[in-house]
Image (tube, grey):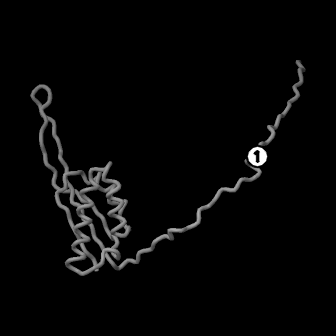
Amino acid sequence: MQVKSVYKYARISAFKAREVTRAIQGLPALDAVDVLRLAAGFKKVSPLVLKTLKSAIANAENNNNMRPERLVVKEAVVGEGATFKRFQPKARGSAGPIRKRTSHIRIILTDEIEIERREKGRKTNKIKKTAATKKQEPIVETAEFSDQQS
């Protein structure tokens, strides 16, 4: 079953918001929450997407009796909303346009996709020291030149 949540008229351009939503697509919902909390310090759009994601999780729990541990972000889409048009005074009595862009953030969660997790205790590849790390003698080449002039 799919659950949807939409944040309309978010005051950020869709171009900037798409960068964050691309990062959470296909992740389990609870992992996506962690990713957005981490990104909240340096991306303005992260709290807006996090708010929408939490709303979708709450909709799934309360309206459809779904468990949040089984939810996966199927879609995280940002579309362009209305653009507020303002004018900035310029030299010689002219005016320049200012476009304050908005966007619509839509998140769809599903429980139909299986969650595949990595093993936590996986082995790390250790680099073995080989003969290549030992000191090697430099190769010195000598060339013979002939001084014959015509």
Return the x and y of residue 79 as percentages of the image width and height. Answer: 24, 59
Amino acid, disc 1? Lys
Along the viewing direction, whichever of 24 and 67 lies nearer the viewer: 67
Left or right of 27 in this view: 91: left
| Res. 65 image quadrant | bottom left
* Quadrant occupied by the C terminus: top right
- The answer to whether residue 101 is above or below residue 71 is above
Return the x and y of residue 17 as percentages of the image width and height. Answer: 28, 54
Q: Residue furthest front?
A: 121
- The answer to whether residue 20 is above or below residue 107 is above
Return the x and y of residue 1 as percentages of the image width and height. Answer: 28, 80
For image coordinates 17% across by 60% down, the residue present is: 8
Left or right of 17 in this view: 144: right
For image coordinates 12% across by 42% down, the residue present is: 86
Along the viewing direction, whichever of 57 and 78 lies nearer the viewer: 57
Q: Residue furthest left?
A: 93
Return the x and y of residue 14 as percentages of the image width and height. Answer: 26, 54
Instruction: Assess disc 1: are there few (<14), some (14-19) or many (≥20) residues with their C-alpha within 10 Å of its C-alpha.
Output: few
Along the viewing direction, whichever of 101 and 51 lies nearer the viewer: 51
- The answer to whether residue 53 is above or below residue 10 is below
Q: Count of labels shown?
A: 1
Along the viewing direction, whichever of 136 and 126 lies nearer the viewer: 126
For image coordinates 35% across by 63% down, the residue present is: 24
- The answer to whether residue 108 is above or below residue 133 is below
Q: Secondary structure at mark 1?
A: loop
Which residue, given by chain and number where applicable, does mark 1 sit on? 134
